[in-house]
Image (cartoon, grey):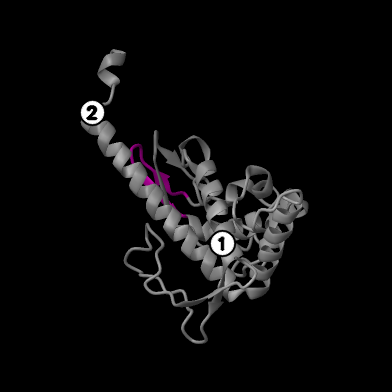
Amino acid sequence: MSSIDQMMTEEEVVANMFSLFQGAFDGHSLSMTFIIYELAVNPDCQQRVYDEIVTCFQDNNSSTNQTIGHQFDWETLSKLDYLNACISEALRLHAAVNRDGRIAKQDYTDETTGVTIKKDQVIQFSRSAVQRCPDYYRMPDQFIPDRFLKHNKHLLVDSAYLPFGLGRRMCPGYKFALMAIKLTMAHLLIRYKFVAIDGQTVLKTDPIVEHYTYCPEKLYLKIEKRLIFN
C-alpha cells in the first residue's frame, strides 16, 4: 500500500479532531470537579494549597504592586509543588476515563492462569483498580497528596499511575492539560474557598457510565469568597 493510500480523508480528520476536543473538554471539567471535591472534604489540604499560592505569588512579585492572583506567570506556577501534588492525588483517586483498552497483535497464553488471549481480541482494564491497588499505594483510598511530593516520588511505581494513559498511546495533550488545570485551580483557590456541606457533599457516581467515564451524578458544595482577594 502506498503512503497516499494511508492518508486520512477530510471527514476522518474532522471526526478525529471533534473526538479530541470533546475528550479534552469532558476530561478537563471532570478532573476539576474531582480536585475541588477532594480539597473541600480535606480543608487542611486546601488551606495548605492556598498558603502556598499566596507565598509563591508574593515572592515572585515582591518588586511590583500587582494584586495577589491578578496574574500567574510560569515561574510562579512551577513553584506550586503542593498544588501539583493535590492534583496528582485527585487524578489518582478519580480517573476521568476509567477504562483503557488494547487489541492483541498475536495469540498469548498467560503461564500463571492458563488464560489465552486471541489475536485481535480487545483487552480492557480499570485504571481505578490499578491506581487504588494496595500493592502500589499505602492507604490507597485516602487522599494523601504528600505521596506525590518530590521527596516521596521514589516510592511511586510509574506504571501504576494512569490518569492520562501510558506509553505511545497516552493522551497527546496531557502536559497542556495539567498546566491548564494548575492555572485554573490557582485562580480559583486564591479567590474562593470550597466548603463541604454536612451530609450533602458526597461523591456519587452513575454505575452505568462509570465503566468508561467516571462522572458524579450530583455534587453539592458551598463556595465562599476569600476576603484577602480584591
Residue 10 is labelled as 2
Instruction: Give the crowd class for mark 2: few <14, some 14-19, many >=20 residues within 10 Å.
Output: few
Residue 136 placed where, x, y %?
64, 57
Note whether residue 127 is visible: yes
Residue segment shown in magenta? 114-126
Q: Residue at the bottom extreme?
A: 199
Q: Amino acid at mark 2?
A: Glu
Q: Residue at x 67, y 46 (%)?
A: 78
Residue ID for mark 1: 90
Residue 122 magenta:
yes
Quick check: 69 above or below 228?
above
102 or 165: nearer the eye?
165
Q: Give the left or right position of residue 120, taking residue 136 as reference.
A: left
Q: Residue at x 64, y 58 (%)?
A: 67
Residue 85 placed where, x, y %?
65, 57
Residue 146 magenta:
no
Q: Give the left or right position of residue 199, taking residue 19 as reference.
A: right
Q: Quadrant of the C terminus?
A: bottom right
* SS at mark 2 in the image: helix
Q: Quadrant of the N terminus?
A: top left
Q: Residue at the left extreme?
A: 11
Q: Amino acid at mark 1?
A: Ala
Residue 99 placed where, x, y %?
42, 54
Quick check: 227 above or below 80?
below
Q: Residue at x 26, y 38 (%)?
A: 15
Quick check: 219 above or below 146?
below
Residue 178 placed where, x, y %?
54, 48
